[in-house]
Image (cartoon, helix red, strand yellow):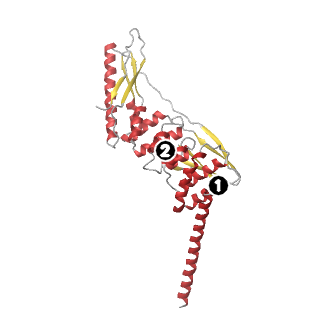
């Protein structure tokens, strides 16, 4: 009997604690909602900060509504309270795992591309238009790479059609005298650019996290978009009334090589195999102008068939070449002959109509 009374007492105490915990959580949710509705940016930032850490379904719509009203703040200077609030809002949306409609993120694409891309990666249905816009910004390397990686993962047909139109095709011909050793060739690699920045929030604002995109995996980084070069995002938290420094590594990739990488992934081949198709090389001894043109034509025929076979392989995964798209093989002739008394005839570009 004594045991039963003790058990009842424990259960009642546990129920009281549980009820109290639920009540505290509900109070925190109500406080976050109230702060979000404030007209003061510092209060709104604290509301976003709490909402991002409470992970409450009740706060999803209030957070999303903040994006609808905040588009007028997108150009706010980096030292302003408006800018700090936007940082807090993006941080809250990312931390609370909500999906913000792409139409609400569109006003922020120009100057807030990094957090926008992180949120667009969650939107499987309506993000294609936004990603296509961002994927055209080749001058902004990480934005370009991330958006293209996400579109490749989606197997976007519109993205694939544009990708083909951006591919340059070459064929390098090396010609030497009969009996001369065939010349060799070499390659080069790219490098990276690094930068550093610093951040501080206005006085009294909550701790706010800044998101950066990188191609390197570091401790604490999160994989965002797989591709020929994977993209990760990193967090740098700026504590209340503190200043922190953070570094950003610039991309070390070449866009055309990345495009080859996308085709390789879609076709189930290595990047080097695909590069060999679109960057073909041939070498042969010079045996007169007529034979030279014949050798060139046969090499271009073989390259054209290789390109068609590659695109057929990609079509098997559901991405077709649209009508009207064509490629042009641009020949480059390197004359290694010692005897150049007879000039080489010009090698004309080859137009490839991809759809027959």
Residue furthest to the left in view is 356
Q: What's the residue at 67%, 44% (across, down)? A: 198
> Which residue is identified by label 2?
230
Task: Count every numbered label the image shows and give the total.
Answer: 2
Q: What's the residue at 54%, 60% (across, down)? A: 59
- Seen in the picture, residue 290 relative to 162 is either above or below; the reply is above
Badge 2 marks a residue whose secondary structure is loop
Specify whether 288 is left or right of 256.
left
Q: Position of residue 163 (x, y in %)?
A: 42, 36
* Quarter of image, res 299: top left
Badge 1 marks a residue whose secondary structure is loop
Q: How packed is label 2: few (under 14 Cα within 10 Å), some, or many (20 or more)? A: some
Q: What's the residue at 52%, 41% (across, down)? A: 143
Q: Whole-Å distance between the Cαs marked 1 and 2?
A: 41 Å
Specify whether 32 is left or right of 339.
right
Is residue 288 visible to us here? no
Q: Position of residue 176 (x, y in %)?
A: 39, 17
Nearer the viewer's eye, disc 1 or disc 2? 1
Q: Which mark is residue 69?
A: none
Which of these two is toward me, 100 or 289? Answer: 100
Q: How packed is label 1: few (under 14 Cα within 10 Å), some, or many (20 or more)? A: few
Q: Are marks 1 and 2 in contact (CB under 8 Å)?
A: no
- Seen in the picture, residue 294 relative to 69 is either above or below; the reply is above
Q: Quadrant of the image for the C terminus?
A: top left
Q: Which mark is residue 39?
A: 1
Q: Position of residue 72 (x, y in %)?
A: 59, 46
Specify whether 131 is left or right of 302.
right
Earlier sequence position, callout 1 versus callout 2: 1
Is residue 138 visible to us here? yes
Q: Position of residue 60 (x, y in %)?
A: 52, 58
């Amino acid at each position: 009997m004594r045991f039963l009374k003790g058990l009842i007492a424990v259960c009642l105490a546990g129920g009281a604690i549980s009820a109290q915990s639920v009540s505290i959580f509900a109070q925190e949710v109500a406080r976050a909602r109230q702060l979000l509705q404030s007209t003061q940016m510092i209060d709104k930032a604290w509301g976003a900060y709490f909402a991002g850490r409470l992970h409450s379904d009740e706060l999803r719509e209030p957070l999303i509504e903040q994006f609808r009203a905040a588009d007028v703040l997108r150009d706010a200077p980096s030292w302003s309270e408006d800018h700090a609030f936007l940082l807090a809002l993006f941080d809250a949306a990312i931390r609370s795992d909500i999906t913000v409609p792409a139409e609400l993120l569109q006003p922020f694409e120009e100057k807030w591309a990094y957090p926008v891309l992180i949120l667009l990666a969650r939107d499987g249905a309506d993000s294609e238009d936004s990603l296509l816009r961002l994927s055209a910004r080749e001058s902004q390397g990480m934005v370009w790479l991330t958006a293209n990686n996400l579109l490749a993962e989606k197997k976007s047909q519109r993205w694939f059609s544009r990708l083909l139109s951006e591919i340059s095709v070459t064929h390098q011909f090396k010609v030497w005298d009969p009996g001369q050793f065939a010349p060799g060739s070499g390659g080069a690699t790219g490098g990276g650019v690094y930068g550093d920045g610093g951040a501080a929030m206005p006085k009294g604002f909550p701790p706010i996290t800044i998101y950066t995109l990188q191609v390197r995996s570091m401790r604490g980084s999160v994989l965002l978009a797989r591709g020929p070069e994977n993209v990760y995002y990193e967090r740098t938290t700026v504590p209340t009334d503190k200043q922190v420094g953070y570094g950003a590594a610039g991309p070390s990739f070449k866009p055309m090589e990345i495009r080859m990488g996308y085709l390789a992934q879609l076709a189930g081949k290595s990047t080097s195999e695909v590069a060999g198709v679109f960057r073909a090389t041939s070498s042969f001894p010079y045996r007169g102008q007529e034979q030279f043109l014949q050798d060139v034509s046969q090499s271009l025929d073989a390259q054209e068939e290789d390109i068609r076979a590659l695109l057929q392989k990609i079509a098997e995964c559901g991405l077709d070449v649209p009508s009207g798209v064509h490629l042009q093989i641009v020949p480059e002739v390197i004359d290694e002959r010692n005897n150049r008394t007879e000039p080489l005839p010009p090698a004309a570009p080859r137009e490839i109509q991809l759809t027959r």
